[in-house]
Image: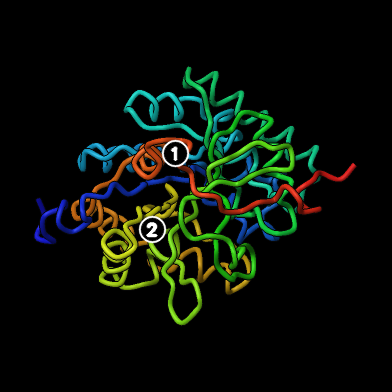
Amino acid sequence: MTASGDKSFTSNGILNAMTVDVEEHFQVSAFEGSVSRDDWHRHPSRVTDNTSRLLDMLDDASVKATFFVLGWIAEKHPSIVGDIARRGHEIASHGYDHRLVYSQSPGEFREGTRRSQCLLQDQCGQPVVGYRAASFSIGASNLWAFDVLADLGFEYDSSVFPVVHDRYGMPNAPRRIHAVKTSSGATIVEVPPSTLRFAKVNIPVAGGGYLRFFPLSVTRRAIRRLNTHDKSPAVVYIHPWEIDPGQPRLEGPWRSRFRHYTGLKRTRRRLIDLMGTFRFGTVREIIEQTLPNPSDVQPGLDVSGNRSSRPPA
């Protein structure tokens, strides 16, 4: 137990989700305009070592997590998926090559998502039923993506970020775990990244750059409030490159460089602190905790009558 206190008291006994988006430092959307996919092979790979270090951190904290893995990574570095699965973590899909969903046609999205899912399932030997889009890029303009996911057998998604952002976000979407009803009549559980409601605005907390930018005390208070006031699990997300302050610096717009490189030196110790303070598990575990009876799933997004929910002909 850490100096931060009793985990059961701190989190009100609630299990939170620890999630990892497995991608290379040069594959992030922030550098998409500077680093061509055709040149990915020219950049030094750091994902294997970074993921291994992150797995060791999780082992030390006795935490199991959900790893959303790019199909491209699974194809180039198949040992990563096997290592994650052997250590008892959940494998989920992050798509194939980190393309923003709203930049693809429904056919392109289906093919890339199916390709990634098949690669991951072959390598881990278990069904892959969870999905998270690159840069949370499912929103009001491409709700048809839920039909594709349901058709491919995905049971949950963690792509709809209920915030205002220049690259992603659907600010009016529900903040808690909820059901999405698709135009085909299927249902998918949506697990949004964590936000707090403040002055009628959703504030993103507990993941990625928000974990690095905000003071650690703010992140702790945010998770504690979600657990004790909202009686809701927090969904924390991290990338392997975020515990790698020595990664090569890439050229790009100042905003992209600021978002990507700020706070890398403090990510590791902040993550260790959170895992010592709160209870964490996989996405599937928090869904079971929140919705012990699948029929109890709370309705949320209903995209069945939304034209943007139906793939164009």
- State yes or no: discs 1 and 2 in contact (Cβ < 8 Å): no
**Is 311 on the left-hand or right-hand side of 29?**
right
The colour scheme used here is: rainbow
Q: Position of residue 52 (x, y in %)?
A: 35, 37
Question: Quick one: which residue is furthest to the right in this view?
Answer: 313
Does 119 sit above or below residue 191? above
Which disc, if any, is residue 67? 1
The kind of residue on which mark 1 rests is: Phe
- Vertical side of 139 occupied by 125: above or below: above
Q: Earlier in the sequence, mark 1 or mark 2?
A: 1
Q: Residue 305, image x and y in percent?
A: 76, 51
Residue 293 left/right relative to 256: left
Residue type at numbered disc 2? Pro
Frontmost residue, 103 versus 7:
7
Distance from label 1 to label 2 (Cα)?
21 Å
Residue 79 or 208: which is nearer the viewer? Answer: 208
Q: Secondary structure at mark 2?
A: loop
Q: Which residue is mark 2?
A: 245
Mark 1 burial class by Cα count in 10 Å: few <14, some 14-19, many 20+: many
Residue 71 coordinates in the image, percent (x, y): 59, 33
Residue positioned 64% across, 70% down in the render: 166
Residue at 50% from the left image edge and 54% from the top image edge: 192
Estimate the x, y position of residue 260 in percent, counting from the top left: 50, 63
Viewed as shown, does residue 57 lie left or right of 143? left
Answer few, some or many: residues within 10 Å of disc 2's Cα (few below 14, many 20 plus, some between 14 and 19).
some
Q: Residue at x 40, y 41 (%)?
A: 291
Quarter of the picture holding the C terminus: top right
Q: Which one is in front, 278 or 241?
A: 278
